[in-house]
Image: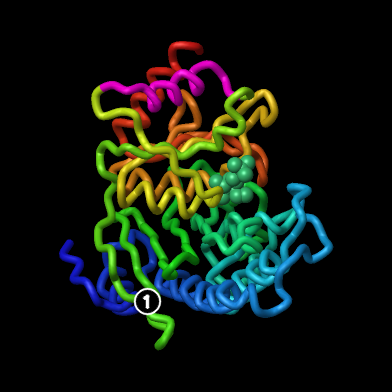
Amino acid sequence: MLRKKNKTLGEFIIENQSSFQYSSGELSKLINAIRLAAKVVNHEVNKAGLVDVLGAAGDTNIQGEDQQKLDVLANEKFIQTLKNREIVCGIASEEEDDFISINSNDEQHQNKYVVLIDPLDGSSNIDVNVSVGTIFSIYRRVTPVGTPVTLEDFLQPGNQQVAAGYVVYGTSTMLVYTTGDGVNGFTLNPAIGTFYLSHPNMQFPEKGKIYSVNEGNYVHFHRGVKDYIKYCQQEEDDRPYTSRYIGSLVSDFHRNMIKGGIYMYPKSSVTQSGKLRLLYECNPMAFIAEQANGLAIGGKSRIMDIQPTELHQRVPFFCGSRKMVEKLQEFLEKYH
Ligand code: P6P
């Protein structure tokens, strides 16, 4: 599919909705809702240093993490915008203990989609002016339309996603998403509030020379991960690789997709299941990665084949350039 640059996101959605396997109009509404919320959150993120939106909101989320005011604001903006579109029957958010049901038991509302979202990932970076991001994942409900949405609608494996994407609030603000037909990146022109197709058909380079992991946790990693990190650091072939870790999944992932690289958040003796959440961080990023010729695994298994058991469950996460993830897998399999 030819993707001419400088097309607006709106034009792109209309031109490509026929390739969406479900009701095209509904996808357009969904992506447009995310586009609007992204612009509102972008405005707030960009002025964070000027207005008193910094600092914890005094509350803590289910993860026990201090909620930054922007976390709360971003969460409210995305939920409200999605509710207004009347095609979403349920929302799960990192900032909400339980899922939110929307018109899902109202006969007249034929809402078919559930959205899972991390409204502001990496929010601890806000105070130090480092990029943050929004991550979203979209499924069709599995319970009958017009009945109350249930947890079953959210606990679907990632291979059932119909769309996924992220917004990175960086030196420029970008919306990157897939509906299962490749990955495309749109850059916001803040002067006119329009997203333009700037990165058509994004693909991970098959190999890269960047590895992203919090090496401060090295002592707690399992042997296979330690050996792979040492492999990256050896002077041999195209190595040593470069270590780059921003501490913001969306930013590390986005850089690796453009330059080539691998991102790792392993389980450890401290975080037995890893840190990242399966439903609204790992699955959407895995969908994008695979659509961009990359790989995303939780260890031995493909991330998108994991059957979820809890809304906020955590999994180990390794994702990026195909050949780098495959090499890591060799090290992991040595010790399992
Ligand atoms: P650590 C941010 O909190 C996040 O969820 C990801 O965006 C990021 O990659 C990771 O956690 C950073 O975690 O433990 O290395 O600070």
Q: Residue furthest bottom?
A: 192
Residue positioned 36% across, 71% down in the render: 187
Name the residue located 53 percent from the left edge and 16 percent from the top edge: 223
| Magenta segment includes 223 | yes
Query: Toward the viewer: 188 or 135?
Result: 188
Residue type for callout 1: Phe
Q: Is residue 166 left or right of residue 200?
A: right
- Residue 115: quadrant of the picture: bottom right
Q: Secondary structure at mark 1?
A: strand
- Residue 205's place in the image compared with 297, above or below, is below
Q: Which residue is mark 1?
A: 195
Q: Residue 290, relative to residue 45: is it above or below?
A: above
In depth, the one of 5 and 56 nearer the eye is 56
Q: Is residue 309 visible?
A: yes
Q: Residue at x 44, y 43 (%)?
A: 244
Q: Is residue 271 magenta?
A: no
Assign the magenta stretch its main secondary structure. helix
Q: Within 10 angstroms of label 1, few (less than 14), some, or many (20 or more) residues?
A: many
Q: In the image, residue 248 lies at what x, y percent?
A: 54, 52
Q: Which region of the structure is painted magenta?
A: 221-236
In the image, is residue 17 above or below residue 254?
below
Q: Residue shown at 34%/27% (left/top)?
A: 326
Q: Is mark 1 within 8 Å of ligand 1?
A: no
Which residue in the rendered view is the most extreme toward the left?
2
